[in-house]
Image (spheres, grey):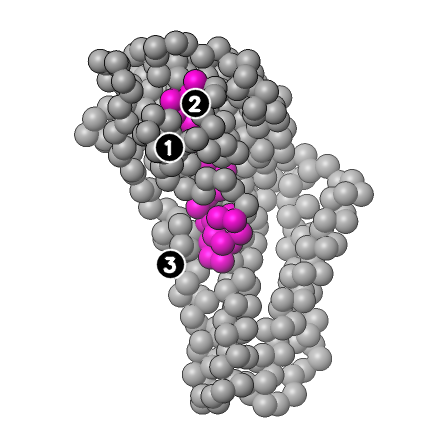
Amino acid sequence: MYSMEIDCGLIFFVGIFISILYGVQLFVIWTNQTILNSEISILLYFLPLIIIISFMILIFLFAKISDFLYSIIYTIFGVYLGYVLYIFLISIIIRILLVIYSPPFYISLILLYLLPLIICIYGIINALVTKIIKIVLKYPGFNGKCTILHLSDIHLGAIHQKNSVKKIVKEIQNLEESPDIVVITGDMADGSLRVKSDWLSPFDSLEMPILFITGNHEQLNPKKDMLKEVRKTSIKYIGNEGNFIHKGVNFLGADFEYNLKEVLLDAKTKENMPNVFLYHVPEIGPEELKEYNIFLFLAGHTHGGQIFPLNIGAYLTNKCFKGLYSDQEKMHHVFVSEGVNNAVVPMRVGS
């Protein structure tokens, strides 16, 4: 069973979360009332609060008694949050439209309840599809070839477990060109449920080295338990400022908790060799990499925003948002993965 520690900070966060979620749903109810131009039963005002509190109680209860039931209720709650988000956004649009135009009430109701459902169904399906991007980078004087498969944000936990790893491994094995090495740039754990080595065991069937550094969600696993499970597999952890040379390429990494620029100054880089640095958060741009002798910086964390309109916030708050960034000379590069899986809400809309 998953041990969920309850403290004052968690109680405060849950209280704020419930208040915001309830307020959002009250706005939807008021919009519904405006569309129907009629009074709504007082019970309907309390229904969202009952639903939210019921979810909270079940999540905390199942976390103590059953991983299976906890995973089910956690996933359902994630879908519910996605639906509430989009029904709220559509409510805002409808209230704006009502100022300038009054469509038939049934059209407004279809927009209010059916359109968010369609968006959520699309988001769930889209989240299950893996997009593979192939990029060729050239390092001056390097005559060899090293194919790196970059994974990030696998988020194993309540929603994604062993079957997700099996899917990843199968897709790797089905690639036209087998990679020379696999690197995982953090958040292999989600923190919603502790990762077990059995979930990671499908990676053992891969013949190439697999490198791993931790991200912010490993702190929730907690990290020491996560690393204990990782060390039972063939995955090589290099997050404690370690390095690994393979096919003429020097791979270095650091965990999320370390100060990135301090680590880069002390990194075991090699001269006349491509240095590839693994770090979860894209805190640095390609122009700065020359100072640290880093050819390629691989990161994740942003999820490409995961679901609209969170994409906007992710874009504004991260130095590099998604995809490849290069300096003017094309000598230093940052690549940010949008992530294999998702966190909390099992959807992807606009990513």
Whichever of labels 2 and 3 marks the residue nearer the N terminus, that label is 3
25 and 91: which is toward the camera: 91
201 above or below 48? above
Q: Which residue is mark 1?
A: 327
Please name which of the two marks, 1 or 3, marks the residue nearer to the observer. 1
Which residues make up the magenta segment? 293-316
Q: Position of residue 160 (x, y in %)?
A: 47, 39
Is 219 within the magenta? no
Badge 3 crowding class, 10 Å Cα cut-off, few under 14, some 14 to 19, many 20 or more, is: some
Please name which of the two marks, 2 or 3, marks the residue nearer to the observer. 2
Badge 1 crowding class, 10 Å Cα cut-off, few under 14, some 14 to 19, many 20 or more, is: some
Residue at 33%, 29% (x, y): give it.
Answer: 329
Give the position of the N terminus as an image quadrant.
top right
Label placed on residue 122? 3
Residue at 74%, 54% (x, y): give it.
Answer: 15
120 and 260: which is toward the camera: 260
323 and 227: which is toward the camera: 323
Check whether the beta carbons of the residues at disc 2 and disc 3 lie within 8 A of each other.
no
Is 314 within the magenta? yes
102 above or below 317? below
Label placed on residue 290? 2
Check whether the beta carbons of the residues at disc 2 and disc 1 lie within 8 A of each other.
yes
Q: Position of residue 3 (x, y in %)?
A: 68, 34
Q: Position of residue 334 (x, y in %)?
A: 40, 32
Q: Is residue 169 visible?
A: no
Whichever of labels 2 and 1 marks the residue nearer the N terminus, that label is 2
In the displayed structure, does residue 156 sit left or right of residue 24? left
Disc 3 residue type? Tyr
